Image (cartoon, rainbow, N blue to C red):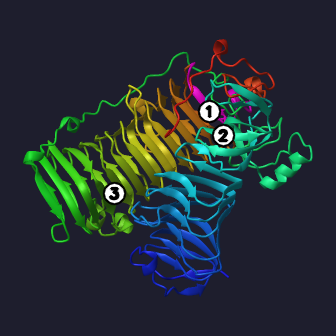
Amino acid sequence: MKKLLSLILSAVLALALVPSAAYAQSDLNLNAQNGGLLISESGTYTLTGSMRGTVWVDPGQGDVTLILDNITIDGGESAGIAVVSGDSLTVILADGTVNSVRDGGGDATYDAAVFCAVPTRFEGSGRLNVTGNNKYGIHGQNADLTFASGSYYIQGAAGSVETSGQLSVLNATVMDLDVNQILAATQQQMVVQTGNSGKLNLREEPDKSSFMLEQYPNGTAVTVLENQGTWSQVEVNGKTGYMMNEYLAPVQGQTVESVSAAQSAGMDRPQMPSGMNVQPQNQMPSGMNGQPRNGINGNNTPGNTALTSTADSPGEIVTSTAENNAASLEADLENAEYITVSEENSQVKISDSGTYVVTGTSSDGNITVKKGTTGVVLVLEDLDLTSTTGATVAVNKEAQVKIIISGNVTLTDAENPDDENSADAAVADAFDGAAMKFKANSQVYITGDGVLTINGSAKNGIKTGDDSSLIFDGGVTVSITAANDGINGNYDVTLLNGNFTIAAGDDAIHADHILTVGSQDGTGPTIRVTGSNEGLEGTVVNVFGGDITIHSTDDAINAANGDGLYEGVLGYSFNMTGGRVSINSQADGIDSNGNVNLMGGYVSIDSASMGGEAGIDYDGQLYVADDFQLNNQSGVAGPDGMPGGMNGQMGGGMNGQMGGPMNGNETFGGQNAFAPGQNGQQPPQPPQMNQ
C-alpha cells in the first residue's frame, strides 16, 4: 500500500517530541514540502519533490519501504531521513532518478544525513547524493547496512558511512567522496579489475615502493579486511597484503558465499559478472552509465601517453586583473561598532568606512552597505539571518567590503521566487534572488575561519554584478544550497582558499568573465560539488591548485558563456597548472568552446562518451604537458565533434589497442604493454584527498 502523508512539522524535534498524529491518504506519491514528514505506519511510500525538514520513519514495528523519485531533502538542523523504529527499512532509488539528502549539522542525536536505527537495505537503479555536515553521511546505529544496487555518492564531516552492524556492498557503486574512492566494507568480497589483461600487485605495505608479495590477474576474488582510503588490506589465496582501491570492484550479483563456493570447487577465476565497473576480459570497460568508455590509454589509469597535443605550446593564459582593494583592509576591533540584530532591530545600514561586528538572529532582516562606501570591514559572527525582502547581505555599487566569517553564520534568502517575474514592476525590481548580492563595480573579499551556510532557495546563493570582483580566501568553510547557481558572478570570481560544498540546481560556480580556482603557487581550496547542472563555468576557467570534486548532469567544467559576453575579448579557454580534479558527469567532463591547456596537476574523468559527449571536448586547440596526469575514461572530442579516442577513433590504448600500463601504474602486463614509466621509474602520483 502506498500512502500520502499530509503532516507538516513546524520544527525538527527530538524523537520523544515527534507528534504521533500523522494522517495517511491513499495516493501514489508523497509530494515533499517545507516542514517535516512523519511515517508512523508500515508500508511503501514514494517521495518526490523537495523539502527542508526531516523525514521521520517511526512505525513502531513492521517494514517500511521508501521509493526515492527525484527527491531533494535538506534536513535543516537535523537528519534528512531519520529511521528510529520498525523491523526494517528498504530504500529504492527509482530508475533514472537523482536524489539528494543532506543535514545541517546541528543535531547530536541524529548525527547523519541518513540515520538508521533498523536494518536498512539500499537498492534500485537511480542515484543518491548524501552530504553529512554534522558527522556522517549515513549512520547505521546498531543496524546492518546493505547496498544491494544503485549508485551512491556520500561524504560526511567524520566519514561517509558508519555502522556498528555489518556493512555489505553487493551490486552497487558506493563512492566515498571524502577520499574519492569506491567504498569497500570490512570482509566485503571484491574482484581485481585492472581494465586490461594485466595483473594487480599485492604489496606488503600500503605503498607502491613496498615489497611486492604477488601479482593477480583480472577477476581474482579478494576479501577486503580494512579500507584505508587509497589502499585496502586484503586477503587473497591465503596471503594478506595491500592493494590499491582503484583496481578493486564490487562483486556484481553474487554474495560472498557464492564466490567462496565457486573457489572451493576449484575455480581459478570466478565467472566475471556483468554490470557497473566489472567487465569480462578483452572487452571495453563500461562507464558508470553503462556506455562504452572511450579511454585515452585503455587501462583507466593516470597517464597521457596516448593523448596528443594539437598545439606545440599552450595558448595564452588570461588571468584576472580586476582590482580588489578590500583584500588589504584590516579589522580594527578596538574601534569597531558592535551590532546585534534581532526581530526588533533587523535592518543594518552601513554608509561609512570602519569595522562592524554583526551578530544575532532575525527571521526577516538584512545588512546593506550603501553605494560607493569603501574601507568597510564587516565581521559576521555567530549570525543567523533570513530575509524575505531581498538579500541578507547586500553590497551596493562601487562599494569595497572585506567580510570576515567568525563562528557559525547562516544566511537564508526567503524571497518568493515568483516575484522575479511579477507584473508589478516595483516587486520585480526589488527581487534580489540571492542570499548575498554584490552589485556592479563592487569589490568583495571574504575570509575568516568560521562556517558560512548559504541557503539560496529563491534563486542563487551568491550573485555579483557587472565589473565586480569577488575573492574567497583564508580558512572559511562555505556550504551553499541554491535553486539556481551556487555562485553567479557577472564578472570575475576567484577562490584562493577555503572549503566549499555546493549543491545547485544549475551552475555550482559561474563567472561571466574569469573564474579562478587556486593560486599560481599551486595552493588552493577544497571544492565539493555534490549536485549541479554544470559545475564550473566561465569564459575563462583557470585551475591553479586545490582539490575539486564535481558531480554534474551537464558539463562538469565549461569554458563558455551563453550570452557570448567577453568572447571576442578573452576567447574561451580552460587552463590547468596544478591541483586535483575528479569529475563524474552525465555529459562532457571538460568542455571548452575554445582551447584546453593541461599544463600541470591531475584530472580523473568519468563522463558520458556517446551522443556527442566526451571526457574532453574542445573547439580550438588542445595542449597537454608531458608530466600532466590524466585518468580519462570517456574519450576526447576535437573540433570535428566526434567523441572517442584521438582523431575521432574509439579510444583504447595506443592506436585503439587495449593497452597495459603506460606510465608505471600498479597494474602490470597486458596486450602491447609498455615499460613502467620513463627509464622504469614510477611517475609522480596525484595528491591523495583528505588523507
Residue 650 in magenta stretch: yes
Instruction: Please state the extent of the stretch shown in magenta in the rendering.
Output: 626-652
Residue 135 vertical placement versus 273 (above, below) = below
Identify the amino acid type marked 1. Answer: Pro
Asked if the stretch drawn in magenta spans residue 431, the answer is no
Image: 234 above or below 214: below
- The answer to which of marks 2 and 1 sits earlier in the sequence is 1
Answer left or right for 5 relative to 302.
Answer: left
Q: Nearer the viewer, residue 205 or 666?
A: 205
Please name the amino acid that badge 3 sits on: Ala
What type is the residue that disc 2 sits on?
A: Gln
Residue 663, percent from left and from top:
66, 22
Name the N-terminal-most of marks 2 and 3.
2
Q: How far apart are marks 2 and 1 (CA)?
A: 8 Å
Q: Can residue 396 be seen in this view?
A: no
Nearer to the camera, 328 or 251: 251
What is the x, y in percent for residue 626? 57, 18
**Which residue lies under the disc numbered 1?**
206
Whether residues under marks 2 and 1 lie with C-beta atoms below 8 angstroms apart, the answer is: yes
Residue 471's x, y, as percent?
31, 40
Where is residue 203? Give x, y as percent.
Answer: 68, 30
Give the prevailing secondary structure in the magenta stretch.
loop
- Image check: 471 left or right of 200? left
Crowding at label 1, few (<14), some or many (≥20) Cα neighbours within 10 Å? some
The residue where tag 2 is placed is: 233
Residue displayed at 68% across by 24% down: 211
Is 493 situated left or right of 296 in this image?
left
Q: Measuring 35% from the left and 63% from the top, which residue is drawn there?
A: 420
For label 2, the SS is strand
